[in-house]
Amino acid sequence: MTGWLSRRTNARLALGGIALVCATTVGCGTALYEVPVETPIPAKLDVSAFQRVLVAGFVAGGADDIDTNQETVRLLRSQLRSKSELRVIDADVMQLVDVAQEQNKAAVNDASPGDGLTIRTSTEGTGVTALPQKIKDEKDLEPYDRLFANTAYWKRIGEEYQNPLIVTGSVLFTPRSSSGLVTRETEVYDGLGRRRVIPQRVYMERKGFMLRPKFVFIDGRTGATIYSETRREEVLYNAQQETPALSSYFELMDRIVPDFLGALSTQKIKGTRVLIK
Amino acid sequence: MKLRCVPFLIAAFALSTSTAFADNRDEARSQVDFGINVAQRGLWREAIYRWEKAVELDPKYAAAYNDLAIAYEHEGQLEKARKAYDKALELDPNNSQIRQNYDLFKEINDRVAQQKDKR
């Protein structure tokens, strides 16, 4: 009887011991919990002095397939309406190429030693750089940068709209083509019918578009530039693929817009992290 | 007689300190548990309060520092988050989970630092 009791006690103790070890293992074991996090990134600019924003217009060039100035203004205004606290001013889109051309003409006439009555059409001998009528590449855009430095002009625009933050700049949207070796993933099946994906270098002709916007942020109270930022993105498709220019434009703008918004308002970067017990 | 008491007193002291340490660790664990619970429901400020308490109670609790770093990150307190991650990795350098969290955080932190430099 005693032997039986002690055997039972021993068994109980053993079971208790196992349970204790299990509990300790579970208790000491690391438990992980994946949680979504949203890290706020502060805005690049302090725009607390402004209640309103005027997306004025852009010096646009490149492909004729779309009206890049109109599309850029429309897209930025709608993004700012939904994702920033600034009130977006609805105004006609400014044709800044024409504005720059007029300013240039005035500068030419001011600089020319003529009789003051003849209007000069050439910049020759005046020291003023001519503005290309048709903007095809980045080089053509460069002389237009003068327009953004014209504080008197932007101050006047600012006064007209009651001193908002002014967003302007230039946008170049041009067709691109490229040919060469690219890495593509190809499916292969071995003797046993098993599928594998292997990278393969193949020669390809591709075409697409390049988008290079320069965003200039101007203080409407002073006309001075407070910040500017240039981005460059391109997309290339198989040469046989017919992708409309407007789709490519929006595809490229999609990559750029978060950065643009990040200049004006706090952006949240979504991700996941693992909490540990 | 007095000398005979010394080992007993030392043992009693050691026992009481280890009990206090165990109590602190237990309390820190329950704070971490509670913090996880509220963080999962989106109450990150409450979670921060709990995890700050946990690291106060047990300054060698790497997981608590990791969780605290995540909460600071969520609240946009990136400098505090970096310090907490550093501490977590100092205490548990081989923990791949902490390392992974830190790498993801670092990507964002570097981006913000670049922005500040541009300004």
Image (cartoon, coloured by chain):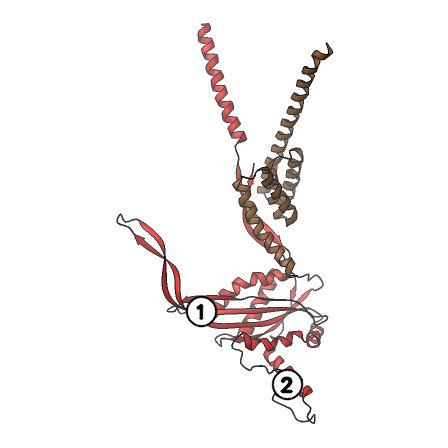
Location of residue A231 (image quadrant) = bottom right
Outermost residue, left direction?
A191
Q: Is residue A158 left or right of residue B64?
A: right
Chain B shade in the render: brown
Query: Which residue shows up at 51% across the image and 69% down it?
Result: A211
Location of residue B98 (image quadrant) = top right
Residue linked to disc 1 = A208
Q: Amino acid at mark 1?
A: Gly
Whether residue A4 is situated above or below residue A88 in the rendered picture: above
Query: Which residue shows up at 66% across the image and 22% down it?
Result: B14
Q: How far is mark 2 from mark 1, CA to CA?
A: 36 Å
Categorize mark 1 by other alpha carbons within 10 Å: few (<14), some (14-19), many (20+).
many
Categorize mark 2 by other alpha carbons within 10 Å: few (<14), some (14-19), many (20+).
many
Image quadrant occupied by the N terminus of chain A: top left
Instruction: Please report, as a chain letter, where disc 2 is located.
Output: A
The chain letter of the red chain reads: A
Query: Which residue shows up at 62% across the image and 80% down it?
Result: A100
Residue linked to disc 2 = A105
Tag 2, which secondary structure? helix
Give the image location of residue A30, x and y in percent: 53, 35
Whether residue A100 is situated above or below residue A47 in the rendered picture: below
Give the image location of residue A230, x and y in percent: 58, 67
Closer to us: B41 or A277: A277
Image quadrant occupied by the C terminus of chain A: top right
Give the image location of residue A224, x and y in percent: 70, 71
Give the image location of residue B117, x and y in percent: 64, 59
Whether residue A171 is situated above or below residue A3 in the rendered picture: below
Of the numbered discs 2 and 1, the one sitting upstream in the chain is 2
Tag 1, which secondary structure? strand
Query: Which residue shows up at 52% across the image and 75% down it?
Result: A137
Closer to us: A80 or B1: B1
